[in-house]
Image (tube, helix red, strand yellow):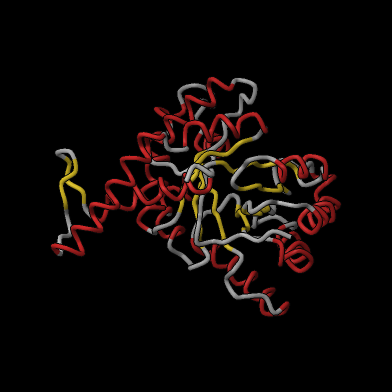
Amino acid sequence: MSTQNDSLRIRRSEYIVPAHSLKLMAQAAASDADEVIFDLEDFCAVSQKVEARKTLVQGLNTLEFNGKIRAFRPNNIRTKFFYRDVIDVVEQAGKNLDVLVLPKCQDTADVLFADRLLTQIEQNLGLELGRIKLEVLIEGARAVMNAYEIASATPRMAGLIFGAADYAGDTGAKELTTEQFSVYHYPKSKTIAAARAASIDVVDSATLQFRDLQQCEKDARMASQMGFDGKWAVHADQVSVIHSVLTPTAEELRRASEILELYKKADLDQGLGAIVYKDQMVDAATLRIESKKVAIAKKAGLL
C-alpha cells in the first residue's frame, strides 16, 4: 500500500466521492487528485450511512492510492453516527488513513473532541500519535467567527476548507453559482487568514455545476488569486481543470527557482535577510510562496 509523506502537503485538488460506492472510490483513487475524500456525510443517504462504513474500510484497505492523501468525512459530530463512523473506520483502516475531514464544525470544542477520540484509537492500536491529521470545514456563521481558534486548536490540524453550500444554508444566502466570490468574500477571506495565521493549508469549496468546466476554471482562478491552496472537486473532469490553474507555469517556476537561489546566496555570502529581484523586494515571507510553487511542481513531475 502507498504511504503519504505529510512533509509535502500539496492540496491543489481534493476529490470527494460517496463512501457507499466502491466503484466511485476506485475511480477517485485512480485519478490525478492530490487528495481523495470518501464521504459518509452529505453524499450518503441516511439509509446507507451505516453500511457505507464497511465499504469505506474496504476501499482504504484494498485500493492503490499512488501517494495521494487518503481522507474520509464522517457525519456531523452532533449526530448519532459520528462516534461510530470514527471508531469503525479508524480501528479497521487507520494505518491506511491520513486525514479525517470534520464537517459542520462550530468551535474548538468540536476539534478537540475529534482529536481526543483519534488519540485514544491510535493509542489502542499502537499507531503513531497524531499521524492522522484533521481538516475542518468552515461552513457556518459560528465557524467563521471562530476560524482562527479552530485552525490552531491542535497540532493535528492540517487544513481548513470553506464550504459554500452549508454556509449559504446557515446564513440565508442564495448564491451558489457564478457570483460566490463576491457574495462570500468575507467568510472566504476570514478562512484564508485563519489558516495562514495557523500555518496550515486552506481549500475552497467545489463548483457544483460539475459539467461546466469553464466555470470550474474561473472559480479555481479566483480561489488562487484569493490565496487558497486548492479546491474541492465533485467530478473527475474537474481535477485536471483545477490542476491547470493551480500548477505553476514554466515562467513562474523559473522565477521561483531564481529567487530561491539568489536569496540563499545573499544569506550565505552577505548575511542579507532581504534582496531585490527585478525591482521587487524579496524576504522570508516571499520565500514561502516561491517554495510552495517548487513543491507543487515536483509533485506534478515538472522538476
Q: Indicate whether 233 appears above or below 83.
A: above
Q: Quadrant of the N terminus?
A: bottom right
Q: Indicate whether 174 appears above or below 250.
A: above
Q: Nearer the viewer, residue 102 or 238?
A: 238
Q: Taking 183 as reference, is 256 left or right? A: left
Q: Is residue 139 in view from this perspective?
A: no
Q: Indicate whether 96 appears above or below 37.
A: below
Give the residue drawn at x 57%, y 34%.
Answer: 206
Q: Quadrant of residue 151?
A: bottom left
Instruction: Give residue 287's position: percent from left, percent from top.
Output: 30, 52
Instruction: Give residue 84's position: percent from left, percent from top.
Output: 76, 63
Give the residue drawn at x 50%, y 57%.
Answer: 8
Q: Indicate whether 108 appears above or below 231.
A: below
Give the residue drawn at x 46%, y 58%.
Answer: 150
Q: Is residue 173 in view from this perspective?
A: yes
Q: How many marks?
A: 0
Q: Nearer the viewer, residue 146 or 20?
A: 20
Instruction: Give residue 277's position: percent from left, percent from top.
Output: 19, 43
Q: Taking 11 as reference, is 265 left or right? A: left
Q: Nearer the viewer, residue 256 or 60?
A: 256
Give the residue drawn at x 66%, y 54%.
Answer: 70
Q: Quadrant of residue 88?
A: bottom right
Instruction: Give residue 189's position: percent from left, percent from top.
Output: 37, 41
